[in-house]
Amino acid sequence: MTRISIFTTVLACATTISAQCGSGTPNAKVTGSGSAFTAVKGSTTVYTGSDYRLAIQSALDSISSGQRVSVIASGSIGANTISIGSGKIFEGCGTINVANKAGKGAIESLNTVGVQIPYLTMTGNPYFGLRFYGTKDLVLGKITMNLSGGLGIRFDRDAAANTNVKMDVINVTGAGSHAVETWNIDGLTINQVIAKNVGESGLLLQKTTNAKVGLVDGNNVGAGTGYGTLRFANNNGQNANGNYNTNVYVDKVVSRGGGRGIFCVSQSGGAVITTVDLANNGNNAILIENCYNISIKGGTVNGGGEVRLAARTEFPNNKDISITLKVDGAAVRESPCGDNTTWTLTGSPSSKNICA
Ligand SMILES: *[C@@H]1O[C@H](CO)[C@@H](O)[C@H](O)[C@H]1NC(C)=O
Ligand SMILES: *[C@@H]1O[C@H](CO)[C@@H](O)[C@H](O)[C@H]1NC(C)=O
Ligand SMILES: *[C@@H]1O[C@H](CO)[C@@H](O)[C@H](O)[C@H]1NC(C)=O
Ligand SMILES: *[C@@H]1O[C@H](CO)[C@@H](O)[C@H](O)[C@H]1NC(C)=O
């Protein structure tokens, strides 16, 4: 996993993430518990009262670009939104409980430059836990969401694009929808996405180019749906000039149970997945449908649904798909035949219907 360590180093060098949440001297702090919270900026009290959300927002509003807020207190913000402005560093050291505000993030940063969220622990049932668009140089660090519904991290579809987004370890449990859903990012580096008991996708990339992902690890993701641990959709990986030269690199995908393991659809491609470890997926272990220049370079499928190359008639057929894989106890099927498919199969698939 050389690539993971390289990415981690790049991430560490690029940011000023403190060694531990709240360590050193944050410029502002939120402390307290129950119905008594205090926000201070240096030695100035900027909020005191029972409103946890307002304490946090007051702390954020008191700092300037380049400064850091550490939220030490745990509490509930209710069906509300915390907003982070350009250059600000937000650390959620306590547990931030949230609720559903339709169409909004519990925490948002929109049209900003250089925002960092090095640490965050979130619980509850948000519409979006974190919501972004129009960001540049956004850095997310260790983000843990133990949710009872909602979508973990979302980059909006119908809004300004993002450039240079970095994420370290994103760990989402219990989302009703996706753990992480991107739209419109050019330049994305993710160390790990860990998704457990999530309703739709673990990592869903759409209209995202120049992406490097270390590990996507899904356990019971998208059960009973066509979603799964890793999904590329809606022209993901299509370069600005229209071609599909490789620009999306994923080191490893691990998937257990749930819906699909890996699903590429709707004219996505330009991707290399170095290795996979997929077992007992309830839907296709792998489904590649109308995708271009996708290479899976190795790994295993053990049981579960078919490894399938397919095509819908609404888009051009699969092209330049290359799969090297050990398959045991699952079917392998290519139908219709893709254009320039390369298979290197080992193991004992339960059946094999591929084009020569
Ligand atoms: C996650 O949240 C649920 C409640 O929604 C709780 O029962 C469980 O203990 C939490 N898990 C962890 C590891 O904090
Ligand atoms: C992910 O977060 C859950 C709490 O929601 C925790 O129990 C689990 O250990 C975390 N997993 C990893 C790999 O950090
Ligand atoms: C796939 O991407 C690689 C790397 O950029 C490129 O060399 C190759 O030409 C692409 N293949 C096709 C058929 O587009
Ligand atoms: C066929 O696909 C392979 C990789 O899967 C690629 O290297 C090669 O260039 C493709 N051939 C043509 C004729 O595009």
Image (tube, grey):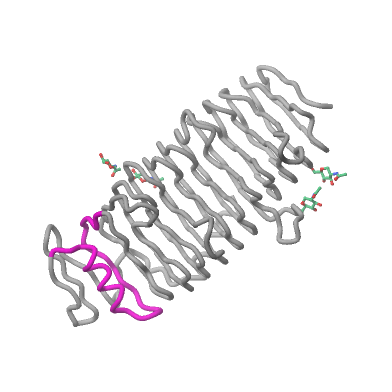
Quadrant location of the C terminus in the rendered image: top right
Residue furthest out toward the top: 350
Nearest the eye: 52 or 119: 52
Q: Residue at the spot x=46%, y=36% of the render?
A: 221
Residue 30, quarter of the rendered image: bottom left
Residue 226, quarter of the rendered image: top right
Residue 160, quarter of the rendered image: bottom right
The vertical placement of 245 against 280, above or below, is below
- Percent x, y of residue 193: 48, 48
How many tags in the picture? 0
Nearest the eye: 346 or 230: 230
Give the image quadrant in which the ligand numbered 2 is located: top left
- Percent x, y of residue 120: 34, 58
- Percent x, y of residue 205: 57, 50
The vertical placement of 110 against 222, above or below, is below
Q: Residue at the spot x=57%, y=66% of the render?
A: 163
The vertical placement of 340 against 35, above or below, is above
Q: Which residues are magenta?
A: 50-78
Q: Is residue 59 left or right of residue 304?
A: left
* Magenta stretch encompasses residue 197: no
- Percent x, y of residue 54: 22, 67
Q: Residue at the spot x=60%, y=38% of the render?
A: 263
Nearest the eye: 356 or 329: 356
* Magenta stretch encompasses residue 60: yes
Q: Is residue 249 left or right of residue 46?
A: right
